[in-house]
Amino acid sequence: MNELADLYQEVILDHNRKPRNFKKLPAATHEANGHNPLCGDRITVALDIQDGVIADIGFQGAGCAISTASASLMTEALKGRRVADALSLFAGFRELVTGGVTDQELGKLEVFSGVSEYPARVKCATLCWHTVASALGEHGQDVVTTE
Ligand code: ZN
């Protein structure tokens, strides 16, 4: 394993041990639940949207290290971002973890690039994003990842 891969691993482990924005959001304007039956990951994501901007975001739930770290890093990436930009970021992230190409600036989210080598893990990494998309688009419809 090369140095970069070790570094990425370190970030994922850190966010799994100490998830950021792991909290309830009493003032949430949007919320949805997500479930990845293949792995057993469950997540609730809540957002407080003000004037088209994600003013605050929090998640709760239980899942594997990848799903927890992905949700943690996602909340950091999305806080303060416009809703439209959040959805473009999701599109870019999906490309990253499925081995595609994107012109999105993914920043820290690039730690998940290695996931593309493990197709079964893609759903773990994208569950939180699908849940956010659902919360934003369909006002709280639950998400179950499917093939
Ligand atoms: Zn998982």
Image (cartoon, helix red, strand yellow):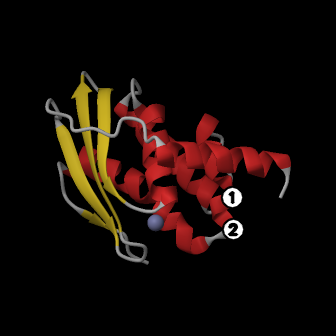
Residue 105 in view of the camera:
no
The quarter holding residue 39 reads bottom left
- Left or right: residue 66 versus residue 113 is left
For numbered disc 1, what is the local secondary structure? helix
Q: How far is disc 1 from disc 2 in space, using C-alphas?
A: 6 Å
To which residue does mark 2 refer? 117
Where is residue 2 drawn, in percent x and y? 85, 53
Q: Is residue 33 left or right of residue 105?
A: left
132 left or right of 38 in image? left
Q: Residue at x 83, y 58 (%)?
A: 1
Q: Position of residue 90 (x, y in %)?
A: 48, 47
39 to the left or right of 62: right
Q: Are the residues tagged 1 and 2 within 8 Å (C-beta)?
A: yes
Q: Is residue 61 above or below residue 38?
A: above
Residue bearing mark 1 = 114
Tell me the crowding category of disc 1: few under 14, some 14 to 19, or many 20 or more residues within 10 angstroms, Cα based: some
Vertical order, 15 against 142 (above or below): above
Residue at (17% x, 48% y) in the render = 139
Query: Toward the viewer: 38 or 80?
Result: 38
**Which residue sits at x=65%, y=64%?**
116
